[in-house]
Image: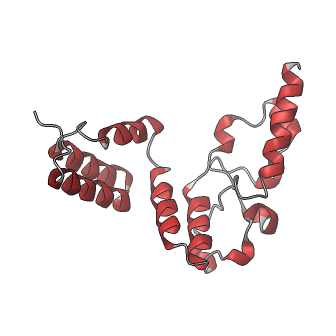
């Protein structure tokens, strides 16, 4: 199989999933302004494709195999944004999946954080990797620099739990 056939096969699979449960794109305006997204609008890619945009601002109908092959679409165009994650959280919450909705909202906050920093936070949260002061500093940075209030609270809570369970690094 040559590289063009491989690209076509991969894109066919991606495009097949665009309307399904695995891949979705963001609406550029806050979904709260629309009154919220419910299960009736799910899957978003099938029910409201013209309202959905990727993090780079590309509208869902723009995602075609031809644009991938020509190089017009790049990996950055396929990145999700906070809006799509918030919409998905609203759908989850509308069917009683509150915990899943909270996870999606935390993920939505993190879309504003550079990938390298998200990975650093992940590593810092592993047991015995950080002191309490380091975790609290990470929480403060996420909150003040990126507006990640929910995640900051989550990390502060983790610091307290790690302290109570002796899972903090000791210098």
Give the residue drawn at x 38%, y 51%: 146
Task: Tell me residue 19's x, y (percent).
Answer: 79, 58
50 or 85, which is in the foreground? 85
Q: Quick check: 98 above or below 139?
A: below
Task: Place residue 150 in its image quadrant.
Answer: bottom left
Tell me the quarter of the image containing the N terminus.
top right
Q: Quick check: 24 above or below 113?
A: below
Q: Quick check: 30 above or below 165?
A: below
| 102 on left or right of 33 | left
| 142 on left or right of 93 | left
| 70 on left or right of 31 | right
Q: Quick check: 88 above or below 12?
A: below
Give the residue drawn at x 33%, y 50%: 142
Give the residue drawn at x 16%, y 47%: 166
| Residue positioned most to the top | 2
Task: Tell me residue 143's x, y (percent).
Answer: 31, 55
Task: Place residue 45 in its image quadrant.
Answer: bottom right
Task: Tell me residue 136's x, y (percent).
Answer: 21, 50
Give the residue drawn at x 69%, y 75%: 39
């Amino acid at each position: 199989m040559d590289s063009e056939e491989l690209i076509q096969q991969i894109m066919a699979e991606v495009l097949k999933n665009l309307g399904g449960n695995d891949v979705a794109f963001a609406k550029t305006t806050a979904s709260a302004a629309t009154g919220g997204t419910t299960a009736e609008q799910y899957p978003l890619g099938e029910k409201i494709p013209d309202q959905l945009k990727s993090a780079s601002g590309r509208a869902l109908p723009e995602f075609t195999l031809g644009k991938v092959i020509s190089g017009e679409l790049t990996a950055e165009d396929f990145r999700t944004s906070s809006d799509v994650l918030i919409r998905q959280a609203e759908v989850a919450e509308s069917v009683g999946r509150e915990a899943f909705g909270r996870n999606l909202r935390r993920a939505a906050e993190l879309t504003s954080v550079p990938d390298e920093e998200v990975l650093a936070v992940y590593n810092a949260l592993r047991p015995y990797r950080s002191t309490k002061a380091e975790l609290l500093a990470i929480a403060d940075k996420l909150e003040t620099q990126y507006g990640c209030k929910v995640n900051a609270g989550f990390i502060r809570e983790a610091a307290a739990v790690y302290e109570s369970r002796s899972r903090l690094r000791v210098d």
